[in-house]
Image (tube, grey):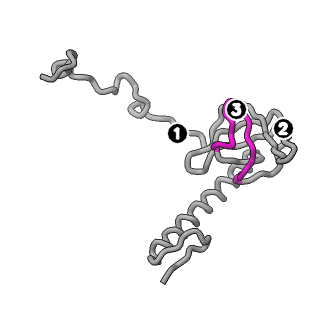
Amino acid sequence: MRYRSRDGLCLSADPNAVALWDSIGDQMATEQGQCTAALRAIGVKAAHPDDGWVNRERNTVHFEYPAFNDGVSVGDLIALGRPRSGYRLVRCTRIEHTGYLIPMTYHHFKDTGQRFPEPARKRRWQRGHPATAPVADVRTRDTTGGSR
């Protein structure tokens, strides 16, 4: 017997695998919903993964598959990223409509330097502070390039 997940993307003879697939999908949907609500609460108008539709050289984004889009205008905040890895907040500076056969809309942006959620401050040992870096033992290090 074959079992199919609720979203139809997983097909397996193992019902436990399908149940796991469904539970992961539910968890991701819950995280996305909570993150969307939090982003809207701080004034973000749209969120999109920070992927190939984001041109980091030209500072543009095309909303191919946004997490949400409430209609971005010049001056509005856009969140680029994902719920688990965090977002960088950018401000829309210009909207460009291009293409004749296939119309495309690009939102030009300027990075605000803000992250959401704010990254936790790393402890000294996590930053690689010189006082906590491992000390090389010069007595066993071979500097001649050969073996001893």
Q: Earlier in the sequence, mark 3 or mark 1?
A: 3
Give the residues in magenta: 50-67
Quarter residue 123 falls in: top left
User: In the rendered view of the protein, which quadrant contains the C terminus?
Assistant: top left
Question: Eyeballing the image, is 127 above or below 62?
Answer: above
The answer to whether residue 108 is above or below residue 104 is above
Closer to the eye: label 2 or 1: 2
Q: Is residue 57 above or below residue 117?
A: above
Look at the image and say whether residue 62 sits in the magenta stretch.
yes
Structural crowding at the residue carrying mark 2, measured as other residues with C-alpha within 10 Å and reported as few (<14), some (14–19) or many (≥20): some
- Residue at image mark 2: 95
* Tag 3 secondary structure: strand
The x and y percentages for residue 13 are 46, 78
Nearest to viewer (mark 3 / mark 2) = 2
| Mark 2 residue element | strand
Report how far apart the C-alphas of labels 3 and 1 lie in the structure: 18 Å
Q: Position of residue 64 (x, y in %)?
A: 73, 50
> Which badge, 2 or 1, is on the more N-terminal residue?
2
Q: For residue 125: magenta?
A: no
Does residue 78 show up? yes
Check disc 1 and report the residue beneath it: 120
Label 3 and label 2: CA atoms lie apart by: 17 Å
The residue tagged 3 is 112
First in sequence: mark 3 vs mark 2: 2
Disc 2 residue type (three-letter): Ile
Q: Given the image, on which type of amino acid does mark 1 rest?
A: Ala
- Disc 3 + disc 1, Cβ < 8 Å: no
Taking depth in this image into account, of 8 and 86 the one nearest to the observer is: 8
Return the mark for residue 89: none
